Image (tube, coloured by chain):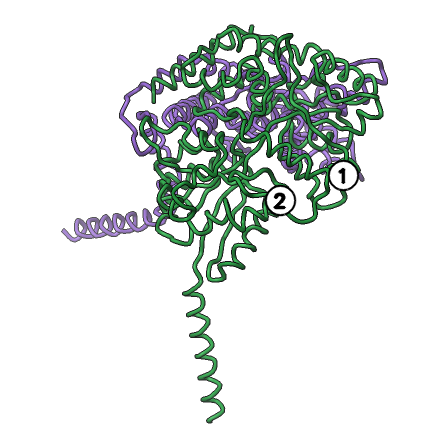
Amino acid sequence: MRAGSAVAAVKRRSASRASKLYLFALPATLLFVVFIAYPILWVAGQSLYVGTTGGAVFAGLANYITVLGDPTFWTVVRNMFLWGVITIPVQMLIGGLLAYFIERHTHALRGFFRTMFFLPVVTSVSVISLVWVQIYAPYYGIAQEYLKDVGIVMVTSPIGDPKTAIYALIIVNIWQWTGFSMLMYIAGIANLPGEVLDAARIDGAKGWRLAVHVIVPMLAPATKSLLLLGVIGTLQTFPIVHLMTGGGPNRASEVFGTFIFKQSFVLGDTGSGAALSVIVLVIALALSLIQIAALGARLSPAGRQRP
Amino acid sequence: MRKLLFLATTILGAALSAASANAEQKEVTVWSWFIQSTMDKSIAAFEKVHPDVKVKYTYYNYSPEYITALKAAAASGSLPDVIGLQPGSLTQQYRENLEAVNERAAKQWGDKWAEKVFPVNRKQMLMGNPKGDENYYIIPQESQVLCIWYNRKIFEKLNLSAPKTYADLKAAAKALTDGGYIPMFQGAADGWQNENVFLMLANQFSPGIVDKAQAGETPWTAPELVAAMKAWKGLFDDGIFQQGALGAHAYPTGAQLFAQGKVGMMALGSWWMQESKFPPPLSEYVQNMDGFDFFYMPPVKDGNSASPPVGGIDIGYGLTKNGGKNPEAWTFLAELTNGVGLQEALNDLNDLPAFEGNSPKGDITDHVKEISARFMADLPKAENQRFASPAVAEALDNALAGVAAGSIEPEAALATVQAATDKALAAK
């Protein structure tokens, strides 16, 4: 009887303690509900209405049907696919190589190179866009000034041609964000356990073999993080496209960000803008889940499961 | 002790007096994309006349900052008292958040006040209103006339004169290109500049035809509009516009090059005069507008006349529902659009007035006065420049870019504009 009441008392204390512990999660939960969950639900609700806020009429899935039937939507999907499959691996590759060479082969100037390659990441997108528009401009542009020395005359701007506009923007994006990949890999390389590298060297691994078979696999957490961030970044693309081409010419370089912006703010069609936002959310969620299922959720060496 | 008591009483009295003064100071909040330096002068002039009112102005870049800020504020009911507007689509998007100003305007300027507004502006003030709604939700402050500016010093150097025929225009473009200049700078990555040039061309083939097309009275695939679209493509193919125009922006790139004397011609409007009022250092061309003069697009086809003036409201202001509860908000709006505030904007050569009877004053050269007078003479007969539906404007922007890039034929491109027009008219 005594033992039973002691157990019950312990259980009561434990339950009371657990309920107090939940209070610690309250601030984060409130912030999540107010700033993330509520806006998502509000946008999802808006996607079911047509018309302006004052005179909106419930329309069910009409906005989704309209959006999916719009050829621009499929141009956007194609552009986003190209953006992702080109920028993410290229940024990783160049960023990884830069990190490797800076960390392994520079000494006194290591800080200088790190800063220089990281500079575009912290530069204003407006400035980057202005500079690259000038670089791409034929006839009076910066690139043309150098190209004419080797007899090349640009007859059109890459961002003014519907066939090349998206690739021209992708190049700018790679230029801007490669420094970020480099930084992630530098952090990864700095955290590599020295004993493993020493062991690999004793076993005869060096140069290319050491890089590909030892360092690259050990940098997998950084690679996974970059992949996840790259996919999210791709879906969030907006300022470079908005400032350089506005999604043109004739919607050839439209991306989800510019498409949603035009529908919601330029055309005032909040319903289809909200429907597009929900579609992007679903795509982002699906891609994140696929990545987590395929690559695992552990994104740092410290988070790896112990044997 | 007495001294201490006196000091305390004095401090208390001063504090109460300051609090009372603050309570009497009324505030008007204003949002717009209108240039800050000129707005500051307008506000200073207003506050001098109305010392009990404080105007708090917030400047935004037009896109995306201003239109997103408006949308968010409208959704949350926190719009300022007065907002900058363009006629047509932007005004219509916020019509439900705006006060009709007819009665206030009649009380301010008399029953026949609307007749003092230039005809093209008056038309644009009602643009997009539901059928039967004769209310005004926007009061225009400034007007504009579209034109082609040219650098007369470069033209003089190359023995060129303002083109009167399309052959002249082509010859001038070639001479400019051969001379190492950009012939006519077109920021064709910007929809607005493309629209402006197309409106010049279309109105040359048939004055007012774009208005009829957007009202559904004429198809967009009418022969005159197809011819205008072909002429638009010709401006790229014939070397009138610079190479790579489709990737270029009018602002800041084009305007800077034009001001620096590296460009021969540029399709802009009367607002270009303000360049001469910007802070120094100014180029020899911009100084007092010495290097610049304007012409209208010469006939692009035998039998056409030169493009008529096209224009309308540059910027206007609306009184929000929140502003309707603040009597000083209308007072400021009235002074800004047709009073001391407007005068400061005109003195800065920001653009042309929207109401008759106003003109710039102060330090202005004869050359600028002459240019301004020519614009003012053309303004009353200007064709409409604005679109009632943003979807139609957007469709036309895409059509123009597609045709210029050669990815779509003029007829097919205009059919897409027709589809957008049909949809917009059906939704009305």
Residue B165 screen position, x and y as percent? 70, 14
- Which amino acid lies under the numbered mark 1 shown in the image of this protein? Phe
Q: Residue furthest bottom?
A: B1
Task: In the picture, one chain is purple; tell me its letter.
Answer: A
In terms of depth relative to the viewer, which is nearer, A283 or A206? A283
Residue A197 in sight from this viewpoint: yes
Residue A30 shown left or right of residue A200 in the figure? left
Residue at point 51% right, 49% down? Answer: B339
Label 1 sits on residue = A112
Question: Which of the two discs, 2 and 1, sits closer to the camera?
Answer: 2
> Where on the picture, by quarter, is residue B168?
top right
Q: How many marks?
A: 2
The residue wearing badge 2 is: B360
Image-based side of A137 in relation to B227, left or right: right
Q: CA distance from mark 2 to mark 1?
A: 55 Å
Contact, mark 2 vs mark 1 (Cβ under 8 Å): no
- Residue B385, given in percent of the width and then of the height, sits at 52, 25
* Observer-nearest of A112 and B11: B11
- What residue appears at the point 72 percent right and 19 percent down from the top-left corner? B163
The spot of residue A274 in percent (x, y) is 38, 27
Chain letter for the part of the structure drawn in green: B
Q: Secondary structure at mark 1?
A: helix
Q: Is residue B197 left or right of residue B282?
A: left
The residue nearer to you, when weighing B327 against B75, is: B327
